[in-house]
Amino acid sequence: MFTTNDVLETINMVEREHLDIRTVTMGISLLPCIRATAKETAAEVYDTVCKKAENIVKVTQELSTEYGIPIVNKRVSITPASIICAPFASEAAKIGKALDDAAKTVGVDFLGGYSALVHKGMADYERTFISTIPEVLASTERLCSSVNVGSSKSGINMDAVSLMGKIVKETAQKTEKTGGGGCAKLVVFCNAVEDNPFMAGAFHGVGESGTVINVGVSGPGVVQHAIEAIPTANLSDLAEMIKRTAFKITRAGQLIAREAAKRLNAEFGIVDLSLAPTPARGDSVAQILEEMGLESVGTHGTTACLAMLNDAVKKGGVMASSRVGGLSGAFIPVSEDIGMIEAVEKGSLCIDKLEAMTAVCSVGLDMIAVPGDTPAETVSAIIADEAAIGMINNKTTAVRVIPAPGKVVGDSVDFGGLLGRAPIMPVHKQSAAKFIARGGLIPAPIHSNKN
C-alpha cells in the first residue's frame, strides 16, 4: 500500500508545475436497470447513479485536502447506453435525460457512456440509438457520447463511419449557439477501451465489475520542468528522465485511486497516466516537444519526439502502479493545449501532421475545429483515416472533430474552461464521397488473426 511518504516529492510539483489528478471516474454497470419500458428504466438508471455516486464529490474533495493534490474533475461512466436502450431505442432520449439529471444531482462534471459499439455491424436498435445522439447532446449539459466503429480484430464498419459523419454534422448544427460545442462531447473510436477515465470517450465496459474507480493523472508541466533541467542531455538520458518523472506522477494516482475506491465502496480499476494538457501555459504537451528541441510543434521531427515521449511515459507509469490502463501516454488535443493552438495559428501544424502524430500518441485527432461547411463525407473520411491507423497498429484511435457552424479558416471558436479555444483548421477540398458511399466493412489486417 502506498503512503503519503511515497508522494512527498510529488507534492512540491503541484503549485509550480500544474501537477494534478485530472479525473476520478466512477464506472457503474447499469445492466440491472433494464426494465420493460423506457420510463421505468430511466427512473432506475437515475436512482442507481445517484446511489452509487452520491459521495464521489465529497470523497475526492477530502482526498485532495488530505494529500495536497488537486483533483480537477469528478466523473461517472456507465454501461454503453445503446445496450440499456435496446428494447426501446427510439425512446433513448429519456435515458439520456435521466443520466444528465443524475450527473447534476451528484455534482459530477461529466457523465460518459451514451455510447454504442458497432465496430463489426449495426443492429437496427443501434442505428436508431445513434440517430438520437445529436438531439440528446443538444438538450443535455453533462452527458458525453461515443461510438466505436472499428477494431483490429473486426475491421472498420464503414456503414457506421458514414453515419457518424452525418451525426457529427447534425450535432454541430443543433449546438450552433455554442460553436458546435455538442461535438466536443462526441468521440468516434477505433479499438475503444473499457476502462478509460477521460471524457468524452469514457464508458463502463461490460467486462468490468459492478462499480469501479479509474483515475486519470496528468502532469505535462512536471515533465517539461524535468526536461528543462537537462538542456544538453542526449535522447537516451532524456527518455530516462521522462520515465522517472512519470513514475513519480503515477505514484500519486495510485494512492488516490486506491483510497477513493476504498471510501466509495468500489473496486480499484486502473491508473491512466496520460499527459493531458490544459489551455494554461506551462501545462502543454506541445511545449514538452518544443523543449525536446523543436522550434515549433508540427515541424519535421515532431512525430519522433512524440513517440519517445509516449513510450517513456508508459514505461515509467507501469513501474509505479499495480494497474495501468485506459489510454496512458500523451494527448494532443488542439483546443486544450496552448502550444498546439499557437502552432496552428503560426502555420506549422496542420491536420495532416496531426494525423501522423496520432500513430504514436494516446488517442487521435482530438478537439479539431474545421470549417462549418465541411461536408459530412469529409468528416467520415477523416474518421476512416484515423480508424485505419488504429486498426493496423492495434492501438486506440479516435476523432473528436467540430465542424463549427458559420466559421471559416482564420476564425476560432471558444468553448471555455478545459475545452479551450480552437482555431479553424483547413481540410482538403477534394471529395471522398464516392469512397464513403461504398459502405461495407474494411477487413481486419492479417496480423489480427492470432487465435
Image (cartoon, grey):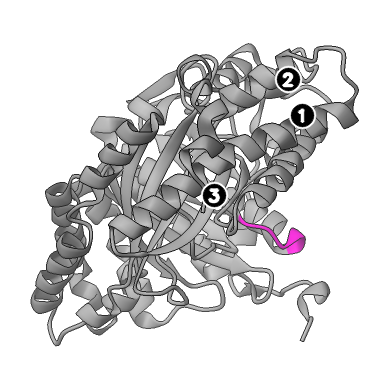
Residue drawn at x 41%, y 31% as measured from the top left: 69
Residue drawn at x 71%, y 75% as measured from the top left: 443
Residue holding disc 2: 227
Residue holding disc 1: 241
Q: Which residues are magenta?
A: 392-396
Tell me if 114 is positioned left or right of 307 in this view. Answer: left
Q: Nearer the viewer, residue 239 or 397?
A: 239
Query: Which amino acid, by three-letter code, is at mark 3?
Result: Asp
Q: Is tag 2's residue or tag 3's residue first in the polypeptide sequence?
A: 2
Query: Which amino acid, by three-letter code, is at mark 1?
Result: Met
Distance from label 2 to label 3 (Cα)? 22 Å
Q: Position of residue 169 (x, y in %)?
A: 39, 47
What predominant SS class does the magenta segment belong to?
loop
Residue drawn at x 76%, y 62% as measured from the top left: 392
- The local crowd at label 3, few if under 14, some if 14 to 19, many if 20 or more residues have their Cα within 10 Å, is many
Q: Nearer the viewer, residue 210 or 146?
A: 210
Label 1 close to label 2 by CB (< 8 Å): yes
Residue holding disc 3: 272
